[in-house]
Amino acid sequence: MKQDRHKRLYDLHSWAGILLGLFIYVVCFSGTVALFGDELGPWENPSLRLAVPERTAAINEQFKEFVAATSSKGTLTFARLDFPHDIAPYYMAFAGYSDDSGETTFIEEKWHPETAKLLPERGDGLSHWILDIHRKLMLPTTLGRTLVGIAGVVMMVLIITGILIHGKIIKDFFTLRLQRSDRLKWQDSHKVLGIFGLPFYIMISFTGAFLGVVTILSPVVALIAFQGDTEALIAKVLGEPPQASGEIVQMYSMDQVHTLKFPGTDMKPVRVIVDNYGDKNAVYRVIYPSETELSSFDQVTISGADGTAVDTELDITRVTAANRVVNALTPLHYATYGGIWLKWIYAALGLFMTILTATGLMLFVERRLHGSEGKKSDAFYERLSRINIGVCMGFPLATAALFYLDKLYTGVEAERMYWTGVTYFTVAIGTTVFSLFQQDGYRNVKQLMATLGMLVLCIPVINAIYTGAQFWTANSVGDVLSNGVDISTIVLGLLIVFSSTQIPACRNDERPRLSDKTIGAVPAE
């Protein structure tokens, strides 16, 4: 009975991994890179390599003109102004308007922090693509975030079943037979990586699943509690949206807002979100960096007409245990609460999680091609192995290619995002197709990894050629962030090139001894 249950858990772990493993791999890898989405901004756009001055320029008139221009195109749905801060040392306004069909269009402008002059427009590309491919797979928000949430759920299933089928989990952690057969080497590496980062994997899978599936939870909760009225649910959580009075008044100056410190601290705001700009009932939601650990942000709500405080005792802002947990999920998932070093720790563990997924896919095929669970001549598993290699190497190569496209692109800025997508999927799919025609998987991985390492290693070169950047000089916060990207790619490129030298050029077919085999219903490893 116990052996049957063990066998069922083993099959669930294996088939869940192979059916959705490549999808999980893409989500894990893209999430690791997406951790540094903010830091990539100054690298891709030299005009953003700025310093936060001691005294910033007045911005109220520019923002007022920006809102007026947006409102002239349609019905203003919202407006936002970001103040210069360390990660984004410039003013940025963001607004949306809806046309007669109800479709919302978004507009963005940036201004220099010292002169308030408009910064050159540049189309969305590298950093936006990396963030969106992880958060919603470049699909419509509800569909994309739901699919990513499902990946988190499946990863939770894999983690739980992985723990249950490895009864000797402590012993497995210290078992690493690198001098034995290739299959045992990958098997032991898979177990060690799985145990080493287990708490992180559980946390990141749970938070990712929650943040993804929450997009489909709202209609369900609304159906149960509010007879399907989603707007009633939103009003209960976020409060009733302020209603415009129709009376036009002078707005409270954004320059004055920028001087407002969070009560009891010296923190200045980093963002203002505006409802009903220009109306007597306008509301400013003033956002501050969170002073509380694992909290997304702190907020003060004021009147847009005169700057007086507005009572916002809403369900979402009440300090309860449940709200503390929910508010902590986003910073916990994206590592926004502990600085750049915490992001690097997350990145290392995220890379381990990516490798864990890749080795799991490899083991599934290895056992069926070279183990006791299949035949060596099985053409299906041969093709599956090549597809696994193509996808696992194709998406990293596609990501590296975007850094080169960012500097080499000379087309219309409005089409930059389109060509970013074309480049990304062309490289990813092209690598997969190439791998389908390679007879020796080990040699293919070795060559593709060496190529990836050289591409990553040379990213600072393409940056220096096209922008004149030198990572040994830094005149602003933007320079520091850009230099950090260059230095990181050098280190990472060297590690990848070194790893490629450690991969054998062909398979080691040494068969495991009887003492190496697992006793019981689970097939021998």
Image (tube, rainbow, N blue to C red):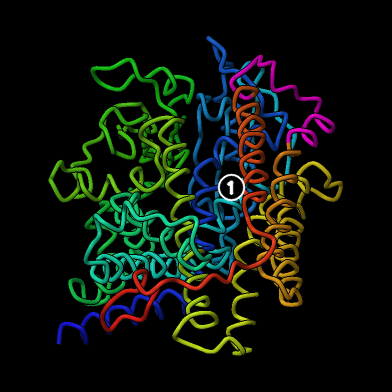
Is residue 470 highlighted in magenta? yes
Q: Is residue 323 left or right of residue 37?
A: left
Name the image quarter holding the N terminus.
bottom left
Q: Is residue 289 above or below residue 395?
A: above
- Residue 165 percent coordinates (x, y): 26, 71
Amino acid type at image mark 1: Ser
- Residue 47 percent coordinates (x, y): 72, 28
- Residue 235 percent coordinates (x, y): 26, 57
Q: Residues within 10 Å of mark 1 (few under 14, many from 20)?
A: some
Element type where label 1 sits in the image: helix
* Residue depicted at 44% across the width and 21% down the height: 258
- Residue 127 percent coordinates (x, y): 62, 45
Is residue 317 highlighted in magenta? no
Q: Is residue 520 left or right of residue 85?
A: left
Residue 150 quadrant: bottom left
In this rendering, the count of numbered labels is 1
Which residue is at the front of the view, 476 or 448? 448
Which residue is at the front of the view, 55 or 331? 331
Q: Is residue 385 left or right of residue 156?
A: right
* Residue depicted at 41% across the width and 71% down the height: 513
Bounds of the magenta segment: 460-478
* Residue depicted at 63% across the width and 46% down the height: 496
Q: Is residue 256 above or below residue 171?
A: above
Give the residue at mark 1.
Answer: 71
